[in-house]
Image: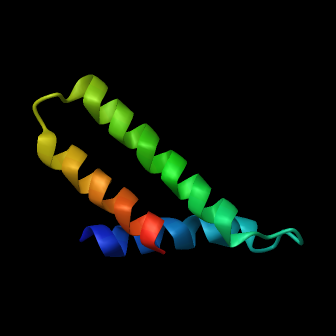
Amino acid sequence: MNSKDKAWQLLQTIESVYIMDVNYDPNKTKQCALICVDELIKEINKYQHENLADIQYWQEVQQEIEKL
């Protein structure tokens, strides 16, 4: 899946949890997705130093989320 589609999928998944909240704020959905991606990048850095393609992919996803 390309980074733009993955970014959209993450936002939609998180939004499905928050949408029922009367205080729904789409910016919170975006913040949650960015936190998730940031944690993924940290874990990849911790355990897979040699796998730069994964890190690059998730950084691209992070950039796409920020654009949404």
Examine the rendered structure and indicate whether residue 27 appears above or below residue 19.
above
Residue at left offset 14%, top offset 41%? 52
Examine the rendered structure and indicate whether residue 43 appears above or below residue 8.
above
Examine the rendered structure and indicate whether residue 15 appears above or below residue 61.
below
Quadrant of the frame with the N terminus: bottom left
Residue at left offset 38%, top offset 57%? 62
Examine the rendered structure and indicate whether residue 29 appears above or below residue 36.
below
Task: Single out the residue that lies furthest toward the front.
Answer: 67
Q: Position of residue 41 (x, y in %)?
A: 34, 40
Residue at left offset 68%, top offset 60%? 28
Residue at left offset 63%, top offset 63%? 29
Identify which residue, 1 or 27, lies in the foreground.
27
Q: Position of residue 18 (x, y in %)?
A: 73, 66
Q: In this view, does 24 lie to the left or right of 32?
A: right
Q: Is residue 41 left or right of residue 52?
A: right
Residue 51 image-quadrant placement: top left
Q: Where is residue 40 in the image (x, y as percent from the top left)?
A: 39, 41
